[in-house]
Image: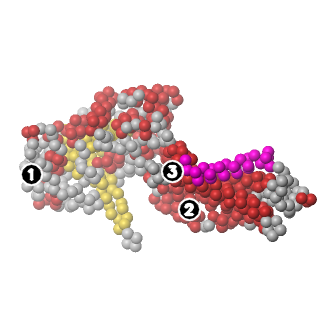
Amino acid sequence: MTPLRRALKRATSNPTTTAGAIITLAIVAAAVLAPFLAPYDPTEQDIMSRLQGPSSEFWLGTDQFGRDILSRLMWGAQISLTVSLGAIAAAIVIGGIIGMVSGYIGGTFDLIVMQAMDVLLSFPSLILGLIVVALLGPDLINLVIAISLTAIAPFARIARAPTIVLKERAFVEAGHALGYSHARIIFRHILPNILSELLVMGSLWMATAVRTEASLSFIGLGVKPPTPTWGGMTRDGFENILDAPWLAIFPGIAILLLVLGLNMVGDGLRDATDPKLRNE
Amino acid sequence: MNSPLLEVRGLQKHFYQRRGFLTPRTTIIRAVEDISLTIQPGEAVGLVGESGCGKSTAARAMLRLIEPTAGSVRFKGEDVLAARGEALKTMRRRMQIVFQDPYSSLNPRQTIGSALMEPMGVHNIATGPDARRRAAALLDEVGLPSNALDRYPHEFSGGQRQRIGIARALTVEPELIVADEPVSALDVSVQAQVLLLLRDLRERRGLAFLFVSHDLSVVRWFCDTVAVMYLGRIVEQGPVAEVLRAPLHPYANMLREASPEPDPNRRGILPRIIGEIPSASAPPPGCAFHPRCGAGLPECSRIVPPLMPLDDGRAVACHLYSPISGRPLSTTPASIRA
């Protein structure tokens, strides 16, 4: 059994991780199936039924333009998940390569690269995301770029440490003796041995990415309206927080649930791959 | 004599260690100080010495797994240290290494088949089904079933992994194999099997070996000639039978006495080992062995004895046999016990 499969097996035996997985998968399903399951068009305005509370007609109520909150949440989940997944995937690839190459080359190069990563790391992720979006302008791709930039440094660190250990192992030396190129050694011999660590860290960082995306949308730097985003909906709801508190509360709960679910899965996976707990 | 396969002259490897922040001080670790040896085609040369004497470092420097500080290495007359790019890749193909630790020498995430076929692809020897056929044949040659191809390293024992490591070295059809303590991490029962396999391969394929070991009985059994290393230098060199039967250098003698032979007539001679190997960052002046040696000539602590060839094909680096000391060249073991 490969270590990843062993870790997955151990993770699924933990009730917290399972609960987290169920929450996360439910939200993913709602996002993917939004075109079929959402009761209303998320951008269709209906002035006659504006600011209605939860009812059998509108389960989670309507906003100031009469748009259905539930439908908007389901469509908004697509933005949250797409941006976070895209950003973390990019961060794993870019950060992973930077970390592996830096650790593999070592010496002064490694020192300079890692100092640069430390500079990136010293920005709180929201501030860094804010700067990037403010510079590039708010749209989906720029949001992905901004959030991935905040996560590159941690992934570089995670990739670098095991690379430094692995490059001294005899099988890497055997690769040199057999005339393998450095790229071949890094990608075919080091990468497979650190991939599970990167993926586990990725699941933990997904939660952070969701939060950052919501925060940026909240302050108006997310995907532009009328496209529904959870952060944007929370902000809009604030304007009517006294008359129609559900407007801000339901998107807030959605963010909370997704972050919680992702964190529970990530924690479970991390514990399952922790060598200290491995033999229990 | 035909032209040598590998010719090493004055090989040197120093490591530099910077310590301290405000006033950094650089320590030079003289892991390999001066190594010269020659390996003929098909010959097995032993490199022995205690832990930390630089024998593994020397072996790796010859293969350029680490870059030597100085010296020259020639493989069939070609300069190994000057080779770059494709030339280096071609050179690497002809010299392979078998590692000590069978547990770290294989990539845990790579099947045995992939590990054996990858070098064939890199060197354009074979691809696809042809490579797989060759890999299966190699496994058979090292005594493993061909169903091992699709399995991962953790499914094999130490001895089996060592066989896989040997098969991997053979994928590129080398002429020289550097065996870096190839059996010292294995159980004694498995050691014998792997040694038999290595000797078998040597005879069948006409391979030359540089056999790095601290186990004199293994070297005596496997090698034709032997070089005894002490603190980065060769102190005695020659045919394995003579050097290990009657060592000339006091250190070689001490090493031999520490390696017991199952002979009741030799009972009772206990090895006398004084002190430990000095640090390679602060080697003693003169002969590096003089603080542990019983000979104690005045020049021992001042002059490094050169490796002097003797008339029986041996060479020794010791003032007891050196013309500098004014003594005649002699091949009789000196009585050097204090």
| Identity of the residue furthest to the bottom in this view | B22
**Residue B177 placement (x, y as % from top left):** 34, 38
- What's the residue at 82%, 58% (across, down)? A54
The residue wearing badge 2 is A117
A129 horizontally vs A270: left or right: right
Residue B83 visible in the displayed image: no
Q: Tell me the amino acid under the disc marked 1.
A: Ile
**Residue A232 placement (x, y as % from top left):** 77, 62
Q: Tell me the amino acid under the disc marked 3.
A: Thr
Q: Main secondary structure of the magenta part?
A: helix
Disc 1 crowd, CA 10 A, few/some/many (<14, 14-19, 20+): some
Give the number of the disc on residue B336.
1
Q: Tell me the amino acid under the disc marked 2.
A: Met
Instruction: Provide the secondary structure element on which disc 1 rests.
Output: loop
Closest to the observer: A189 or A204?
A204
Q: CA distance from mark 3 to mark 2?
A: 25 Å
Instruction: Provide the secondary structure element on which disc 3 rests.
Output: helix
The residue wearing badge 3 is A273
Q: CA distance from mark 1 to mark 2?
A: 62 Å
Q: CA distance from mark 1 to mark 3?
A: 59 Å
- What's the residue at 79%, 46% (across, down)? A37
The part of the chain drawn in magenta is: A13-38
- What's the residue at 11%, 55% (across, down)? B294
Instruction: Provide the secondary structure element on which disc 2 rests.
Output: helix
Q: Is residue A28 magenta?
A: yes
